[in-house]
Image: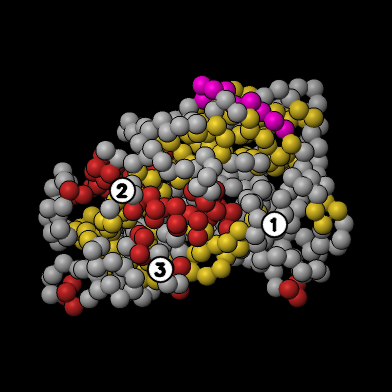
């Protein structure tokens, strides 16, 4: 068994990547791959001596010594530095950790095809010192780690073994000592190489990979982006949180996120809102966006505080929509797929789609565009009943200037919360913010659904120019 993670998940080309690794094999090497339009090999390391170290507690920096649940000292995992060549292009990279037999031979043939795995993987991002593109794609590292329990075994209060995450925090009575209600980004499993706690809640529309992993939503969206010829830089949530660091948004026209971008700190919100106020653009091709507010206890561990919708700055003041008006469908219990009913089809977002007001897309039996989680703005349902375009009431924090371009009505399929409708739309506040309002947008984009693809191109071409 081998686990690893990057000390810093974002590195610059020409600098150094530090991986922390623990293995029960006598040696290991690292094969590097860039995940884009294709999986591109980017070299391998020499063999390194392996060290078998115990797993730490979920809130700890696993590279530093820390106390175990019974007062024992858990030694820090060793650091292995790797030079990042200057000619490595910006992108999302995965380090594949290959165990060796002590004689320079792999214990098993490395699986170079799968970026997703429950161990033996570590995700990191390579950036240039200065912007190399107009578009910056943000990888939702905090969401990955909020669901990440590393081990496939959930914490057992009898044996005091197993992992936990923000969704499975043990009660104080189940633990022999008090622990913080935080999780660390310095542990295996940030997008790959660990186990999401809800791995059994498989996606009926895309069962090949678990939700809450890089492979499920982000990798397909990125592959489409690069196949379509868009030049893109990459960052993680931590870069957006640290405006003084390499995550500065200066020099970019458009920030992208896709799939499930659920966890935001105050600094992430502030930096993104400042970017929009200064004329920058944002496109959220996902759902359940900015739902949880988090705070950092230090540079590497964070806790969930409350929903942004419960504050004086609800997330829909940024995004135009909220999960409280959308909903969640974990499994396919309804035979009625939900897509969008188009409105304001003379808008530039719909250019080239051929749609007219009232037309629907993404609602074929094999599509299910709206779900697994979706967001909405509150609107007067009486207008829908009268065949009029939906428009926000503004009583939930959505600015009345938000233009609703599509409505995915959830009532007929028997799920949803609040207003029970997803609302795709556009908000303008100096800069523009587009929201697709559903986690499953990348799935249909990767399949080549024509309207989803045309809208995506329109948004990228307009907002990145």
Q: Nearer the viewer, residue 8 or 37?
A: 8
The answer to whether any part of residue 115 appears in the image is: no
Identify the element where label 2 is drawn.
loop
* 3D distance between C-alphas at marks 1 and 2: 39 Å
Question: What residue lies at 45% left-to-right and 57% top-to-bottom?
Answer: 269
Label 1 CA crowd tier, 10 Å (few <14, some 14–19, many 20+)? many
Label 2 CA crowd tier, 10 Å (few <14, some 14–19, many 20+)? some
Disc 2 marks which residue?
A: 279
Whole-percent x, y for residue 175 in the image: 77, 69
Image quarter in which the C terminus is found: top left
Label 3 CA crowd tier, 10 Å (few <14, some 14–19, many 20+)? many
- Displayed quadrant of residue 99: top right
Please report whichever mark, 1 or 2, sits nearer to the chain's N-terminal start. 1
In the displayed structure image, the side of residue 170 where residue 84 appears, left or right:
left
Numbered badge on residue 458: none
The region drawn magenta spans: 80-88
Question: What residue lies at 12% left-to-right and 75% top-to-bottom?
Answer: 386
């Amino acid at each position: 068994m081998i686990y690893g993670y990057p000390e810093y998940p974002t590195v610059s080309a020409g600098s150094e990547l530090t991986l922390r690794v623990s293995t029960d094999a006598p040696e290991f090497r690292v094969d590097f791959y860039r995940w884009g339009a294709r999986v591109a090999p980017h070299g391998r390391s020499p063999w390194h001596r392996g060290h078998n170290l115990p797993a730490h507690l979920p809130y700890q920096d696993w590279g530093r010594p820390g106390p175990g649940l019974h007062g024992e000292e858990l030694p820090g995992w060793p650091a292995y530095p790797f030079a990042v060549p200057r000619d490595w292009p910006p992108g999302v990279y995965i380090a594949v950790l290959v165990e060796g037999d002590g004689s320079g031979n792999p214990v098993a043939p490395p699986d170079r095809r799968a970026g997703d795995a429950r161990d033996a993987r570590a995700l990191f991002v390579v950036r240039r010192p200065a912007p190399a593109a107009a578009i910056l794609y943000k990888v939702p590292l905090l969401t990955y780690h909020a669901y990440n329990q590393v081990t496939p075994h959930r914490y057992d209060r009898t044996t005091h073994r197993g992992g936990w995450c923000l969704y499975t925090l043990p009660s104080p009575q189940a633990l022999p000592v008090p622990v913080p209600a935080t999780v660390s980004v310095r542990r295996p499993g940030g997008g790959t190489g660990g186990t999401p706690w809800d791995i059994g809640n498989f996606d009926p529309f895309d069962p090949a990979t678990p939700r809450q992993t890089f492979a499920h939503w982000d990798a397909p969206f990125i592959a489409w982006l690069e196949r379509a010829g868009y030049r893109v830089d990459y960052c993680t949530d931590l870069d957006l949180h640290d405006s003084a660091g390499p995550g500065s948004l200066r020099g970019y026209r458009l920030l992208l996120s896709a799939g499930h971008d659920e966890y935001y700190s105050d600094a992430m919100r502030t930096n993104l809102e400042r970017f929009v106020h200064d004329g920058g653009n944002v496109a959220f091709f996902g759902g359940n966006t900015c739902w949880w507010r988090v705070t950092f206890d230090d540079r590497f561990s964070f806790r969930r505080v409350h929903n942004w919708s419960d504050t004086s700055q609800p997330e829909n003041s940024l995004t135009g929509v909220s999960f409280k008006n959308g909903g969640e469908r974990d499994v396919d219990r309804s035979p009625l797929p939900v897509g969008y009913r188009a409105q304001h089809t003379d808008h530039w977002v719909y250019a080239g789609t051929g749609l007219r007001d009232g037309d629907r897309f993404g609602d074929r039996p094999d599509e299910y565009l709206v779900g697994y989680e979706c967001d909405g703005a509150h609107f007067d349902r009486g207008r829908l009943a009268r065949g009029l375009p939906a428009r926000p009431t503004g009583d939930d924090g959505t600015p009345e200037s938000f233009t609703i371009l599509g409505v995915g009505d959830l009532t007929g399929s028997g799920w949803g919360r609040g207003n029970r409708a997803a609302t795709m739309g556009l908000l303008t506040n100096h800069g523009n913010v587009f929201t697709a309002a559903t986690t499953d947008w990348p799935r249909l984009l990767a399949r080549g659904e024509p309207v989803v693809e045309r809208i995506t191109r329109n948004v990228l071409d307009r907002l990145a120019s």
